[in-house]
Amino acid sequence: MRLGLHAFHHFAQCLSWSGAVVGFHAPRIPNTTYIPPGVDEIMALYYRNGILARWNETWKRSLEIKKITAKEYVRLDPQTKLCR
């Protein structure tokens, strides 16, 4: 099952494993480059700490997926844990 991070923060207590990769990109209309106004702000409600900072600085405007490892995610958001 593939969950967006907004779903992750509601259902999961931790990222699955240290080798996992998480991707971020602009919330655009499929098959377009159009980013609907306000959707990035809704997405930002589900991010915190360094993840929120990166979202606001660059990721929310990126049409290409920006990937980070689970370890990097936890470094940016220490409230998130890696599952054991």
Image: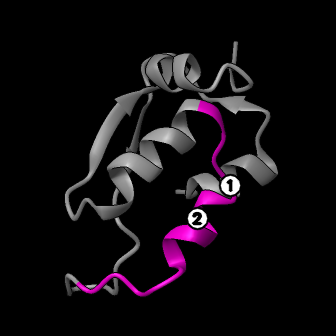
Q: Which residue, given by chain and number where applicable, does mark 2 sit on? A: 43
CB within 8 Å, label 1 to label 2: yes
Taking the spot 71% from the left edge, 29% from the top edge, the residue there is: 14
Q: Amino acid at mark 1?
A: Tyr
Taking the spot 20% from the left edge, 87% from the top edge, the residue there is: 32
From the image, which quarter does the N terminus lie in? bottom right
User: Is 6 on the left or on the right of 26, as rendered?
Assistant: right
Disc sitting over residue 82 in the figure = none
Magenta region includes residue 39:
yes
Label 1, secondary structure: give it: loop
Q: Amino acid at mark 2?
A: Met
User: Is 26 on the left or on the right of 49, as rendered?
Assistant: left
Tell me where the magenta segment starts and ends, as one range: 34-49
| x, y percent for residue 29 | 34, 87
When asked about the image quadrant of residue 34, the answer is bottom left
User: Is 83 on the left or on the right of 22, as rendered?
Assistant: right
Taking the spot 22% from the left edge, 65% from the top edge, the residue there is: 63
Please tell me which residue lies in front, 62 or 57.
57
Q: How many marks?
A: 2
| x, y percent for residue 76 | 53, 24
Magenta region includes residue 13:
no
Q: Which residue, given by chain and number where applicable, does mark 1 sit on? A: 46
